Image (cartoon, rainbow, N blue to C red):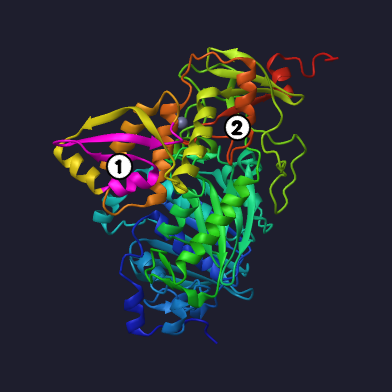
Amino acid sequence: MSKIKVMDEILANKIAAGEVVERCASVVKELVENSIDAGSSEIKIELKEAGTSLIKVTDDGTGMDKEDAVVAFNRHATSKIMDESDLYNINTLGFRGEALASIASVSNVLLKTSTGDVGTLVNIKGGKLIKVENTDARKGTIIEVSELFYNTPARLKHMKSLYTELASITEYVNKIALSHSEIRFTLINNNNVILKTDGSNNLLKTIGSIYGVEVARKMLSINGEDDDYIINGFISLPEVNRAGRNHIITLVNGRVVRNQELNKTINDSYHSYKPDNRYPIVVINIELDPSLVDVNIHPTKMDIKFSKLEELLELVKKTITNKLNSQTLIPEVNIIEFSNLDSDVNLNKKEDLENKFEEKIQFNNSSKPKYEEITLDFNIQEEKYVYKNEELKVKENKERLPLLYPVGLVHGTYIVCQNEIGMYLIDQHAAKERLNYELFKEKLTNPTKENIPMLLPFTIELSNNEYIILKENFEFLENMGFEISEFGINSIIIKAHPIWLTKGFEDLQIRKILELVSSKEKEFDLAKFNDHLAATLACKASIKANTNLSINEMEELINDLRKCHNPFNCPHGRPTIVTFTKYDLEKMFKRSGFESLK
Ligand code: ZN
Ligand code: ZN
């Protein structure tokens, strides 16, 4: 019996906004999802000119019999959705129905398919059936779409550059590969392999195929659950971050979806571990009862609404921060040899494509070294890397910062330390900033009104509108520990200030607090405000560069840093500490492998 039923007309209209086929990427999406529906274990996508001249998808799925192969090109034919209620079931992949018909109406389609018996070949061009005939019986489907938009020149003009087309196809195939680690995917453009996954159902391995083994090595596995949700997946170490946020990938019951709040929460969970304008690489799968979600039923979008969103966000945040808070996160400065630095960017090569996608995440200066480049890397043991469904073990110490012995100070800025593992550099401003930040945040979050009288009462004149806002916030300031009152026209007087302001920086910090309070919005988030205020005050109060510290002062700073919640970053996400391992030092001086080091 035919597997394909013709859908109810109303339902079809509801699904299809008529823009199924917009670009090469949407054609690839339709074809690949058909292959997944057909239960394929291997899907090969071959492109010529980023799909503009050919898109060929080969799978080893169930294939179709002759009847289905022809009906598949009818509008509103689908094998998946049987009634409207199925649409709300996130487990169903088949939103499509008119996709093949739409594609065939604007291109030349050659379909070869077989269920294992007789094969069928169908050729449709511009929506017209050109030929149907028997062909060989290889089980599965091969579909070739060429001359895309040949009869709709207006759409052709809308196509972006080949590079943009290829980039969006690659992005899509990456995501679908991440959501189907059990399927072997190959993506090829002009005979160059862009992606190849092994279908071993190992998510970390798939991440490695997309981002490279180095990134896979720096992924941490996460697991969390509550009554309604189970989450698992991989998050990058904070140092592995990208300029764009599209490497945060969320799956719901194995399917790629989008939810802005979720992405924002994932990124916020890294707050102060990395700069806020850089984004981590995250692949996270959420398992839940399908009745808890509402999917925007549009074939080209996968926006999703969760009915217990707050609960989910809390779980995600808790799971990620707990993981980060248990790691030793000292970036390792190591030496990577680049052999092909000078080769031109070639669209067809995977590495070049990725380099174009991403600015290189390196502390590099403009002059390009010939052979070697110093990059930041993470201190992960040198054990031979084996893919398991867990990250390479990063030491989970109670003491997240190892014992360090200061040796001296460079440029009045960087503390040089050592221990048996290697050499460390600490940025003393960043370190002090971290200490002050955590101190101020604690004081702001749990205000005590404890204060110190000012030696000289402090008066400050404000603009009329600042004055009005500030007057409204007297109570807010008093709770913080200020004694404050009006003092003539548009002026205020401060008689006492919170006890925790930094000695010698009181005036500066008071001005900063007043400035931030007087620019505070009516509707504001106290936690965020306190966080921002703490970071701002911390920067103002911290040792400037070119301040010489004694060895004792350095030791004290390191010991205080060790007690921090996050000793590895300043409140702005810059590193406080980096390390050169002994091995790296040896490599740098070409000692390793050349002579005995005893
Ligand atoms: Zn600063
Ligand atoms: Zn900073």
Q: Amino acid at mark 1?
A: Val
Per the image, the residue denoted by label 2 is 561
Query: Which disc, if any, is residue 517?
Result: 1
Q: Residues within 10 Å of mark 1 (few under 14, many from 20)?
A: some
| Quadrant, the C terminus | top right
Q: Along the line of sight, which residue is nearer the eye, 384 or 521?
A: 521
Q: Looking at the image, is 300 positioned above or below residue 403?
A: below
User: Residue 532: x, y in percent?
Assistant: 40, 41
Does the magenta portion include 477?
yes
Residue 330 placement: quadrant: top right
Q: Does residue 474 appear to the left or right of 394 in the view shown?
A: left
3D distance between C-alphas at marks 1 and 2: 29 Å
Q: Residues within 10 Å of mark 2 (few under 14, many from 20)?
A: many
| Quadrant, the N terminus | bottom right
Q: Magenta part of the protein: which range?
A: 473-501
Q: Which of pointers 1 and 2 indicates the residue nearer the eye?
A: 1
